[in-house]
Amino acid sequence: MNQDFTERLSQEKSNALEKKKDMKVTIFPKRYWVLSLDQNIFEVIQFPQTELKIEYMYSKIVRKKRYN
C-alpha cells in the first residue's frame, strides 16, 4: 500500500493497515475481500494523494506458483 495515502488516515487505521501489509487471505471463487478504510469519501477526495495502490500476489491453493 502506498504510504502517501495511508499516512493521511487516522493513526489507528494507518497502524492497522501496516499490520496487514503481509497477510495471507484465502479467497474462494465468486467471493470477495473488502478492505475498509473507515474514512468518509468526502474526506478522502480532499487528500493530496487520492489513489490507494495495493500490490498483491495470488496462487491456486494447491500450487506454489505465484502470480502478480
Image (cartoon, grey):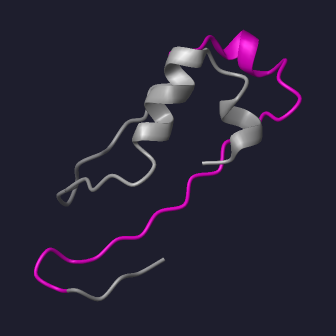
Instruction: Residue 39: tell me if it is visible.
Output: yes
Residue 2 pos. (x, y %): 68, 47
The residues colored magenta run: 38-63
8, above or below 3, in the image: above
Please name the residue shown 17% across and 58% down the image. 28
Please name the residue shown 54% across and 60% down the image. 55
Residue 42 pos. (x, y %): 73, 11
Residue 61 pos. (x, y %): 14, 74
Q: Nearer the viewer, residue 15 or 38?
A: 15
Q: Is residue 17 left or right of residue 40?
A: left
58, above or below 17, in the image: below
Q: Is residue 60 magenta?
A: yes
- The quarter of the displayed image where residue 10 is located: top right
Please name the residue shown 48% across and 77% down the image. 68
Q: Main secondary structure of the magenta part?
A: loop
66, above or below 6, in the image: below
Task: List the single residue furthest toward the left.
Answer: 62
Q: How many marks?
A: 0
- The quarter of the displayed image where residue 48 is located: top right
Q: Is residue 26 left or right of residue 8?
A: left
Q: Is residue 12 left or right of residue 1?
A: left
Instruction: Residue 51: tell me if it is visible.
Output: no
Residue 17 pos. (x, y %): 48, 35
Q: Is residue 22 magenta?
A: no
Please name the residue shown 65% across and 33% down the image. 6
Task: List the single residue furthest toward the right.
Answer: 48
